[in-house]
Image: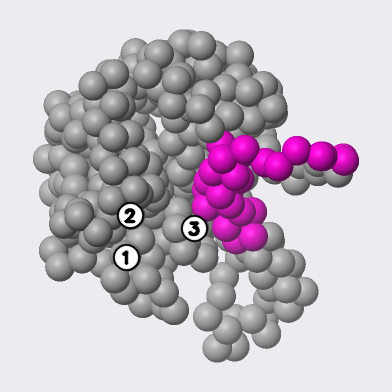
Amino acid sequence: MNSTPDAKRKTALVLTGGGARAAYQVGVLLAVAKLSSNRRHNPFPILCGTSAGAINVTSIACLADNFSKAVSVLATFWRNMHADHIYRADPVGIGLSATHWLSALTMGWLFHNPPRSLLDNAPLRQLLSQHLDFRGIAQSIAKGALHAVSVSASGYESGDNINFFQGHSSAEPWRRVQRIGIRAQITVDHLLASSAIPFIFPATKIHREYFGDGSMRQLAPISPAIHLGAERILIVGAGRRNEHQDRRRVDSHPSLAQIAGHALSTIFLDSLAVDIERMQRINRTLDAIPPDIRSHSDIPLRPIRSLIISPSERLERIAVEHAHTLPWAMKMMLGGIGGMSRRNGTLTSYLLFEKPYTQALIDLGYADTMARSTEVGDFLDL
């Protein structure tokens, strides 16, 4: 049975990138499953994810015909997380990487095979291959439990942000400036490409091009959901929204960890905030146009309802509390660039794939969502 999506298939879930911060998204989904009157029903027939968020939505897509089970499996995945499940965190792995980089920097003219990344994420490929049954995506689509799942990645050669989507036959590809939607059968390579944080994890080749983290050059992270037909979107961020930091006098030069953390936050967080603001502005503009005029016009826009859930606490502060759980080789490396300082927890918050931290983020996501249970339930018709 390959049924045409009905009216309820207009709700999308958009999960952003953020490395280990994506554990927060799992807490949100656990709360949604708890609030649902039908635990098997998937309230998000359109699933769109970037970087670690792409891994989360694909995990849900593989079991979309039983949403509660899908969320439970995903929660077990994150609750038992260790850094060595994601990248080589052993002393030999870290040592080889550091030696390779140091040699390339000091004797680059001798190198015909320069280092590709700071960390080796081969363990992540193995973990995803064991954890995900990608055949479940097609089965969920055939059963009518899923309309489409989209995974974003950034092409290093073309400079385009590519949205690889697998979905119902009614889902159409799209092309905008530096934004392309391409039909594909989602595999582990798409997830590795989407989550290849620049400099930290290696790029992944898909067909003719190497791809990196989907958050790079992602001008409109919400747009894939809209192109796939969403009329309302639940957006789960990886950082606090509209947070204002007071300026203060600083005499010391920022550490390498502080600069790296700032760069990652720019990649993962800023474009989402801008896109949300753009969507809300378009909605206000459309509301100002009388319905009869709008229905007879050629305006290719439609109002989109949205609900944004983001952390109520600063995740870098939580990361600092749990940084000691990292393997000692990683602590040595991060400590060398200032990443273990209580002031510089941002970089650590993206790389801290250890279960005390991921469990704390799951708990926070669950609590933040349950605190808005009436609003969430009304928005999703749970």
Is 182 situated above or below 350?
A: below
- Bounds of the magenta segment: 248-275
| Disc 1 to disc 2: CB gap under 8 Å | yes
Residue nearest the observer in this picture, 371 or 293: 371
Provide residue 17's location: percent of width, then percent of height.
46, 43
Residue at the location (37% across, 18% down)?
329
Q: What colour scheme was applied to this rendering of the protein?
A: one colour
Q: In which quarter of the view is residue 192 placed?
A: top left
Kind of residue indicated by mark 2? Gly
Lower position in the chain sequence, tag 1 or tag 2: 1
Provide residue 70's location: percent of width, then percent of height.
31, 27
Q: Which mark is residue 221?
A: 3
Kind of residue indicated by mark 3? Pro
Per the model, the C-alpha gap separating discs 2 and 3 is 15 Å
**Local secondary structure at mark 2:** strand
Lower position in the chain sequence, tag 2 or tag 3: 2
Apparent side of residue 222 relative to residue 186 in the rendered image (left or right): right
Task: From the image, state whether disc 1 or disc 3 is nearer to you.
Answer: 1
Provide residue 283's location: percent of width, then percent of height.
68, 66
Kind of residue indicated by mark 1? Tyr
Q: Residues within 10 Å of mark 2 (few under 14, many from 20)?
A: many
**Local secondary structure at mark 1:** loop
Is 21 situated above or below 320?
A: below
Is there any visible trace of residue 145 in the rendered image? Answer: no
Q: Which mark is residue 156?
A: 1
Residue at the location (49% across, 58% down)?
221
Q: Which mark is residue 212?
A: 2
Is there any visible trace of residue 16 in the rendered image? Answer: yes
Provide residue 199's location: percent of width, then percent of height.
38, 48
Q: Residues within 10 Å of mark 3 (few under 14, many from 20)?
A: many
Residue at the location (29% across, 18% down)?
91
Q: Which mark is residue 231?
A: none
